[in-house]
Image (spheres, rainbow, N blue to C red):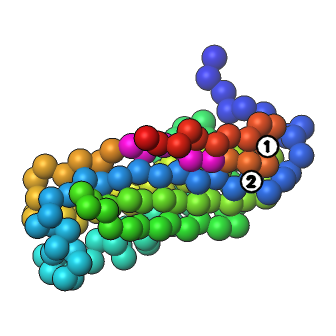
Amino acid sequence: MLRMVDVSGKEATTRPAVASGEVLLSSTTIEKLKANENPKGNPLEIARIARITAAKKTSELIPLCHQIALSKADVRIEFLDDGLSIEAEAITTAQTGVEMEALTAVSVAALTIYDMCKAVQKDIEITDIRLESKTGGKSDYQAKTRV
């Protein structure tokens, strides 16, 4: 039987979560982004806006995800040699965590970058989306360091 998990008996605590991912881009696309010459505008700025919207709407996108009031939703996007690194942090004080909000924020930020760069490059890859850490609930989590 499908059902939303009952969290009514849990204590509300501060619960941060961090997720990350990458968008692999060609050197030509990276140079266009750095020079602010992308035909659709600056995808990094639009991705920052998109991730806030995504984090706030996570429960509308994932059917059994709890609606959560977010205290913070932040994203950092940095250039890599082969693309962009995206990291999203979500924080709430609630009875359940914000892992899904952080993961959704990274995913939608990556998809926004893909959408805004697809006219320049057709073989963009979105990769390595994962939960990095979460604390404040019954069990904490810290991802293993990537090699």
Label 1 secondary element = loop
Check the picture and name the quadrant holding the N terminus.
Answer: top right
- Residue ID at (39%, 43%): 128
Badge 1 crowding class, 10 Å Cα cut-off, few under 14, some 14 to 19, many 20 or more, is some
Spatial CA distance of label 1 from label 2 is 7 Å
- On the image, the x and y values in percent for residue 141 come to 67, 40
Badge 2 crowding class, 10 Å Cα cut-off, few under 14, some 14 to 19, many 20 or more, is many
- On the image, the x and y values in percent for residue 98 come to 65, 50
Q: Is residue 50 visible?
A: no
Number of labelled discs?
A: 2
- Residue ID at (43%, 41%): 147
Q: Decide: is 56 above or below 96.
A: below
- Residue ID at (72%, 59%): 92
- Residue ID at (56%, 39%): 144
Magenta stretch?
128-133
Give the residue pinned by disc 2.
15
Q: Is residue 25 visible?
A: yes
Label 2 secondary element = strand
Give the residue pinned by disc 1.
137
- On the image, the x and y values in percent for residue 52 come to 51, 66
- Along the viewing direction, whichever of 19 and 79 lies nearer the viewer: 79
Identified by mark 1, the residue type is Gly
Asked whether residue 132 is drawn in magenta, I would say: yes
- Along the viewing direction, whichever of 10 and 44 lies nearer the viewer: 44
Left or right: 85 as drawn, with respect to 124: right
- Along the viewing direction, whichever of 79 and 59 lies nearer the viewer: 79
Identified by mark 2, the residue type is Arg
Q: Are marks 1 and 2 in contact (CB under 8 Å)?
A: yes
- On the image, the x and y values in percent for residue 54 come to 48, 58
Q: Earlier in the sequence, mark 1 or mark 2?
A: 2
Which secondary structure dominates the residues rendered in magenta? strand
